[in-house]
Image (cartoon, rainbow, N blue to C red):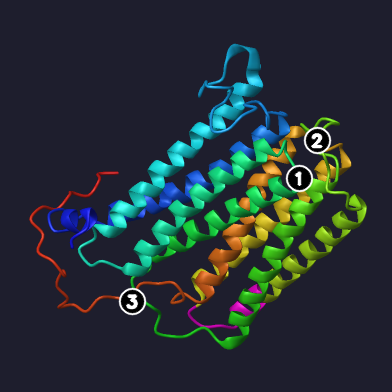
Amino acid sequence: MNTPFGWLAQRITLTPRALRWGTTAALVVSILIVLGGGVVRVTGSGLGCPTWPSCEGTSIAPIPALGIQGIIEFANRLLTTVLVVAVGWAIVAARLQAHRDRMLTRLAWSMFWLVVANAVAGGITVLAKLNPWVVALHFLLAMGLLATATLTWHRARWRGTPGVATPAGPRSIARTLLGLTAALVVVGTLVSGSGPHSGDSIAVPRMGLNWTSVVMVHAAIAVLVIAMTIALFLALRRTPDATMARRTTLVFLAVLLAQGLLGTVQSLIGIPAVLVALHLVGAALVWVGAIRVLLDVEPGLFALRKLPADAQPAQSVSRTIAEPSL
């Protein structure tokens, strides 16, 4: 039995450029969602819409009595709609390629289900009155979405594996680096959930952990991540045909240092709202950067292998959508 997508694929083909734009849009909006959540948090708008999925009672949109906080929370919910459109674009573009890649399609659909999971977690966060453990879960689900969006973005672009394999040393360092970065992100949620935070009122519960101890652990892991990144860069300098991996690692190191400086400054000057929001975006960029480093160190890890020159589309195509002029 033919599915609607299968029926459409027999008649319409989208270009690789449409796929690249779709996956880029999904990745960018996934980062913006983190920024939106940060703005909600630092403005104390987490309960700006006190119910879910409606904003107030039977009203989907915020009512005037909810004030600016209701508008901020509602705008963040609307941003999820933009994300759904971007992910939907990626799914359709992946399915309607002349040479279908099932792994790419599965990755695109994984983004959709993670968007759904994030929306549900956001609703539970409201219903749980900003319970810090639920807030942390919501953030980690957003990081999962970012990871999937990054893998989808990567696979939509790489059309072949390099002729020279990266040595085992840099590969091991890059994998360890990704694991340490994941730990850094997780502990970061504990820092946020156990200590003072811009936008929080005294009524918002905390995790009950020793904030100073958690901050020290977070800082120690950050130092390890920076040291591991430097070690990877030095290892790649001795690796032939690793120009792109070296460049990505160097950019990642710069992002790490900027994020570390931002975190240090915000803790010293009283955790101002603007810096907290920027630090959340920085966390998203660090996580994406760690994944990009691994993918550039091992380019074939999630890459689509080059198709044979004589490969033909699996199905006849009666119409091809022209590439965007952008």
The image's mark for residue 266 is none
- The residue that disc 1 covers is 132
Q: What amino acid type should be assigned to the residue bearing mark 2?
A: Val
Residue 289 visible in the picture: yes
Circle 1 or circle 3, nearest the eye: 1
- The residue that disc 2 covers is 204
Residue 120 pos. (x, y %): 56, 44
What is the C-alpha distance between the residues marked 1 and 3?
43 Å
* Residues at circles 2 and 1 in contact by the CB criterion of under 8 Å: yes
When the figure is inspected, residue 3 is found, relative to residue 28, above or below; the finding is below
Residue 14 visible in the picture: no
Compare marks 2 and 1 and give the one earlier in the sequence: 1
Q: Secondary structure at mark 1?
A: helix
What is the C-alpha distance between the residues marked 2 and 1?
8 Å
Q: Quadrant of residue 286?
A: bottom right
Query: Which residue is at 62% across, 61% downward?
Result: 252
Query: Which residue is at 51% across, 47% downward?
Result: 30
Q: What amino acid type should be assigned to the residue bearing mark 3?
A: Arg
Q: Secondary structure at mark 2?
A: loop
- The residue that disc 3 covers is 305
Q: Is residue 236 magenta?
A: yes
Q: Secondary structure at mark 3?
A: loop
* Residues at circles 1 and 3 in contact by the CB criterion of under 8 Å: no
Query: Which residue is at 49% across, 48% downward?
Result: 116
Residue 9 pos. (x, y %): 18, 57
**Highlighted magenta segment, given as a residue range:** 232-241
The quarter of the picture where the C terminus appears is top left
Disc 2 residue crowd, few under 14, some 14–19, many 20+, Cα 10 Å: few
